[in-house]
């Protein structure tokens, strides 16, 4: 059922989110949501989002993940008590904490606000709250990239997608799947000059003709042109973009939503973002609410502890 639309009806009375099942809201459902003249999103959650499949599109941040050579490597360390000059420890303090030395906000899975290149446009903390949830379209260039590792998404690829799936919704997020991220976290990825990207032609079509919110891609740059013409155009025209996205091979081409989260650093020029695809309940990948322990969270048989070699906490 991945090809069926995943509908969100939130207009005053209509609050049935069908989760890809192709069902129209019943008369009782419509009437129940019209009693006060207001939409009741709790019904949307109970009837659809609760049973949807959730897929994480985010890489885990570690000190050794790929990062552009122009930025210093990240370092993790136990947080030091400023009075004792010793790390906090479970045994003596009852808790531990972590110090993160992150030399850049362009790290891992990201959300780039336009102020990254153009200071007259919004920084990460100035993005509107309406970025939170959007329709998600996934356009694959996996076959093209297999033949040409430097292939860039073209307008023709978008038009082919629309012939199969219908017009890309205005205000949606479009993710470009290339499977480049399957080699993550190989640090060598950050130094490669040939990788699948997104052409300026495609970006202009998506924004000016389809009026999307933003696009995302798996590599850490938008394109391989000498002056990064695609990213330059986006930033200088007030558009955000996602980079370093993962697990797009687990998401259908159409019919899902995407939840978008990121820290709200004042004047931030990049975001350590987390993207979650919310897909129909009959989709083959992902996990549903109630399928895993959430509250309380499960106790592990392995203890989280500091590993000096890895420079981070791991379970042993």
Image (cartoon, rainbow, N blue to C red):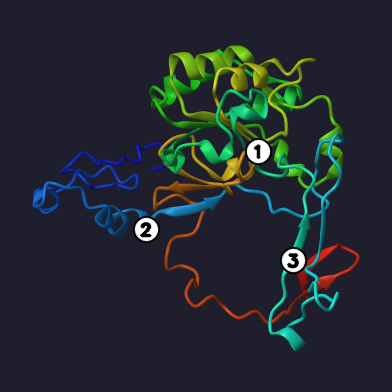
Q: At which x and y percent is residue 265?
A: 61, 46
Residue name at image x 39 percent, y 48 percent: 280
Mark 1 crowdedness (10 Å alpha carbons): few <14, some 14-19, many ≥20: many
**Left or right for 82, reference 105:** right
Q: Earlier in the sequence, mark 2 or mark 1?
A: 2
Q: At which x and y percent is residue 221?
A: 72, 29
Query: In this rendering, does residue 255 appear at all?
Result: yes
Residue name at image x 51 percent, y 55 percent: 286
Residue indicated by mark 3: 98
Residue name at image x 50 percent, y 69 percent: 292
Front position among marks 3 and 2: 3
Task: State the residue lying farthest toward the front.
Answer: 83
Say which element carries label 3. strand
Residue 20 vs residue 66, the one in the foreground: 66
Residue indicated by mark 1: 270
Q: At which x and y percent is residue 165?
A: 41, 27
Residue indicated by mark 2: 51
Q: CA distance from mark 3 to mark 2?
A: 35 Å
Residue name at image x 15 percent, y 51 percent: 33
Residue 234, above or below 58: above
**Left or right for 257, reference 236:** left
Residue 309 vs residue 117, the one in the foreground: 117
Q: CA distance from mark 1 to mark 3?
A: 21 Å
Residue 141 vs residue 105, the one in the foreground: 105
* Image marks 2 and 1: residues in contact by CB distance under 8 Å: no
**Left or right for 34, reference 315:** left
In this figure, what is the number of numbered marks?
3
Query: In this rendering, does residue 159 appear at all?
Result: no
Q: Earlier in the sequence, mark 1 or mark 3?
A: 3
Q: At which x and y percent is residue 172?
A: 44, 31
Q: Quadrant of the C terminus?
A: bottom right
Residue 199 vs residue 13, the one in the foreground: 13
């Amino acid at each position: 059922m991945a090809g069926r639309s995943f509908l969100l009806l939130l207009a005053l009375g209509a609050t049935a989110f069908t989760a890809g099942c192709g069902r129209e809201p019943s008369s009782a459902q419509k009437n129940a949501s019209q009693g006060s003249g207001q939409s009741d999103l709790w019904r949307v959650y109970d009837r659809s989002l609760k049973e949807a499949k959730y897929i994480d599109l985010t890489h885990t941040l570690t000190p050794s993940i790929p990062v552009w050579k122009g930025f210093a490597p990240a370092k993790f360390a136990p947080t030091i008590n400023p009075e004792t000059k010793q790390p906090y420890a479970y045994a003596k303090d009852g808790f531990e904490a972590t110090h993160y030395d992150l030399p850049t906000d362009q790290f891992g899975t990201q959300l780039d606000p336009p102020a990254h290149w153009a200071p007259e446009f919004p920084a990460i903390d100035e993005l509107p709250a309406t970025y939170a949830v959007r329709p998600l379209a996934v356009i694959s260039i996996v076959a093209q990239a297999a033949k040409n590792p430097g292939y860039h998404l073209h307008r023709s690829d978008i038009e082919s997608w629309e012939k199969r799936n219908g017009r890309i919704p205005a205000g949606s997020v479009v993710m470009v799947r290339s499977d480049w991220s399957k080699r993550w976290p190989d640090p060598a990825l950050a130094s490669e000059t040939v990788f699948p990207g997104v052409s300026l032609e495609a970006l202009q079509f998506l924004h000016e003709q389809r009026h999307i919110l933003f696009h995302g891609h798996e590599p850490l740059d938008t394109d391989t042109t000498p002056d990064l013409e695609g990213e330059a155009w986006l930033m200088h025209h007030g558009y955000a973009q996602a980079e370093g996205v993962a697990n797009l091979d687990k998401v259908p081409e159409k019919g899902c939503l995407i939840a978008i989260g990121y820290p709200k650093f004042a004047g931030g020029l990049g975001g350590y973002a987390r993207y979650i695809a919310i897909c129909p309940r009959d989709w083959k990948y992902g996990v549903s609410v109630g399928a895993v322990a959430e509250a309380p969270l499960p106790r592990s048989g392995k203890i989280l502890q500091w590993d000096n070699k890895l420079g981070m906490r791991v379970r042993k």
